[in-house]
Amino acid sequence: MNRSATKSKGFHHFLYWGLPILAIALIIIGWITFSGKHPELMPEPQSVWDRFLLTFTKPIAKTTLLGHAWASLRRVLLALLIAWGFGICFGILIGWSKTAKAFFGSIFEIIRPIPPIAWIPIIIMWFGIGEFPKILLVFIGTFVPLVINTSVGIEMVDKINLQVGRIFGGNDRQILKEIVIPTALPSIFAGVRTSVSSGWTTVLAAEMLGAKQGLGSLVTRGWQGSDLALVLVSVITIAIIGALLSVILEKLEKVVCPWNN
Amino acid sequence: MEQLKTRMKVDNISKTFFGAKDYFTAVESVDFDVYDGEFLVVLGPGRCGKTVLLNIMSGIEEQTEGKIFYNGEVWKGLNSEIGMVFQKLALMPFKTVIQNVELPLKFRGVSKTERREKARYYIKLVGLEGFEDYYPKQLSGGMQQRVGIARAYVSDPRLLIMDEPFGKLDAQTRYQMQEDLLKIWDKEKRTIIFVTNNIEEACYLGDRIILLSDCPAKVKEVYPIQISRPRDMVSKEFLELRTVISDNTDLSI
Amino acid sequence: MDKQNLEVKMQSWQRNQKKENIKYILLSIAGILSFLIIWQLAVMLGFIDEKMLPAPTKILETLIYKINNKPPDGNVLGVNILASLQVALSGFLTAIIIGVPLGLCMGWWIYADRFIRPIFELIRPIPPIAWIPLVVVWMGVGLQAKALIIFFTAFVPCVINSYTGIKLTNQTLIDVSKTFGAPNREIFFKVGVPSSLPMVFAGIRVALGNSWSTLVAAEMLAASAGLGYMIQIGRTVARPDIVIVGMVVIGAVGAILSMVLTRAEKYFLRWKINR
């Protein structure tokens, strides 16, 4: 390798590591400068940190930050489990049977475009602002992507796999269990991943509009009390948990579908 | 001379596909016999009618005209005595080799110990002993085809239909598989219907060759082959046979 | 097998196909009708409290009423729809205009990727709803504020999908172009971008769904017009019929936007073979 090539390789390394560091530095400097000039619009990093620590000593609504995070998570997980059960079964039904798809699918197609958040007012009217309506809301938000991904996964099973099943004497139920569903598993799992991120977003919305506990309720509290630092603490916590859920699911996929990749 | 028993008779079979504006005939008035225990090769150009014909013979597709006779009687639909090796493989990627091979038995409700035992026998027969717990994607193309063959054998069929099973393999593996297939056939004799578009392969493997025309597929000629096995691809008689056939075909190779 | 025979068979096949298609269409209609009829009967027979869930006929009545009347939220239906569309589309289109080229550039030029990535990764994990309080504090509740919220929601999938789409460009195509002496910029525009279009459209589709959904949330939390606002008012004055009309219209507009996008996709991806 001649000298100019080595030089450009060195330059490349410099930019490769230098640019992200520069970007992060700019963000931090920007934050500090902006919050210095307008503390009412954007709390300084220091005050955010202080607010974070304060949540441990001075709990809000008798719960610490972790307690709120757990309240949110608990709702999501409960709703998800129910949604997975019903959603996957329903998805298999309308993916497998053309008749079922025609009859049930039509109602589903009409309900589908309604964003889960648009359900909030009617559900509050029917059930108030307790635990059940929130879980119901998350259920609605997670049910839809699950059904879609599952039914598409089932419909897209290659015809030849079905032929294999029939040639070797399998009846419909056997073909479904041994061939079709496992083939659709990656799709179903994609639906699971979407449903988790959708559920996390929906639970936040539900909490922001009326809850005593949960990260969404902290956001609203901070917002209405002009406690921006609290808003930031909650948003950052929300983001971290969301990212963690995503990573966990990625790892889980490798376990459930080891033959992919 | 021993009277050969006819296992299956394809009688004036035609298949036309209908569309919104017009129709398309893939198979036209195909007529031939399949004798018990023979290695029958169906040779024809690619992309036309061969797979459709096989699907009709195995019962997964229905013909537009004509009849299929099995053991002398008219037969409709699936036949549990027919096994099939597919061109596009169709192994389940989420099942291991042994799980793939035992699948036909699982469908029949055979107990786990019994079907595992049978599966192992055929896995050994095709030369894949030791690979029982591998996933298909960990195997080479030739090995995957062997799994397909073992799976077709495990249901104990009288008739084995093979749809261009070596089509996607490289030349080297192909020659090896042809030899191995004959060895397997020797050990476990079944009636084999083998479809290909390769004249060499047809001449090497078959007792008889049914030559099909280009679209729509019709029977052009039936060639009984008298050369004894093992055949030599460069022997005089082989090359003569090859020339006769290639002169008559719509094929390029 | 003569031609006449085949013609006859073809016609009978086509007739059967038509019959089958009609059967499925009828089933779909039957599905929807059964749902509506059961709902209507449940309300009429008193199983469902009318004050909680009005009958379908009442919903229809309210829908027609809202087309020309302002109460209870202060706008006719059309004005609400327009207000929502205005906000949603301005945020959505801005996100496409900025996000797609950004994602493409990040996927193509490694330095762009390294510089922008940290900023992007900061924005990505924040759920769109969480932006609402922040943006509202910074910019109030005007059109720009809400459009900015929508922008954040739509921005993320546009960037991610454009990035992935162009990363998946067939290396062989790139290599062939290089052997023809094409400069990097040209390969980007003539090979990279077109081949990434399917994924870009998939990202735009997700962005559309997100935008519409977040819009409703934003309007429910901070607005004076729009469909989300209408629903919120409907709740506060205990008018479930207004709420449901709002929901249905939101769904319908969302579906129409989606169909428009599909049309555009079919136009831009004319060359794609659908298997």
Image: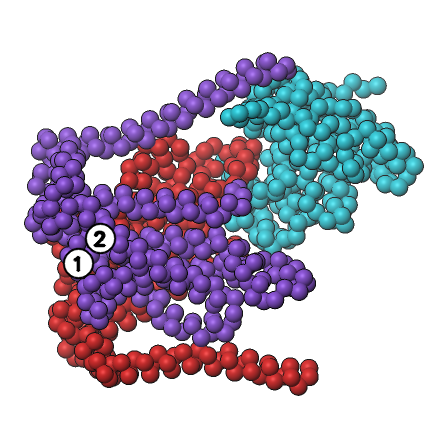
Chain colours: A red, B cyan, C purple
Q: Is residue B90 above or below residue B71?
A: below
Work out whether disc 1 and disc 2 sit on a shared chain. Answer: yes
Q: Is residue B53 left or right of residue C224?
A: right
Q: Which residue is mark 2?
A: C83
Image quarter of the N terminus of chain C: top right
Q: Is residue B37 left or right of residue B233?
A: left
Percent position of residue C241, x then y: 13, 42
Which chain does the numbered disc 1 sit on?
A: C
Report the front residue among C201 and A173. Answer: C201
Q: Is residue B206 left or right of residue B30?
A: right
For numbered disc 2, what is the local secondary structure?
Answer: helix
Report the front residue among C183 and A52. Answer: C183
Please give the name of the residue rendered at 89% of the width and 33% of the height, measured from the top-left corner: B240
Please give the name of the residue rendered at 30% of the width and 58% of the height, measured from the top-left corner: C90
Report the front residue among A173 and A42. Answer: A42
Determine the CA span between mark 1 and mark 2. 10 Å
Percent position of residue C169, x then y: 55, 59
Q: Is residue A190 left or right of residue B83?
A: left
Q: Amino acid at mark 2?
A: Ala
Q: Is residue A155 visible?
A: yes
Q: Is residue B189 visible?
A: no
Please give the name of the residue rendered at 79% of the width and 30% of the height, measured from the top-left corner: B249
Q: Which residue is mark 1?
A: C223
Please give the name of the residue rendered at 22% of the width and 57% of the height, measured from the top-left corner: C217
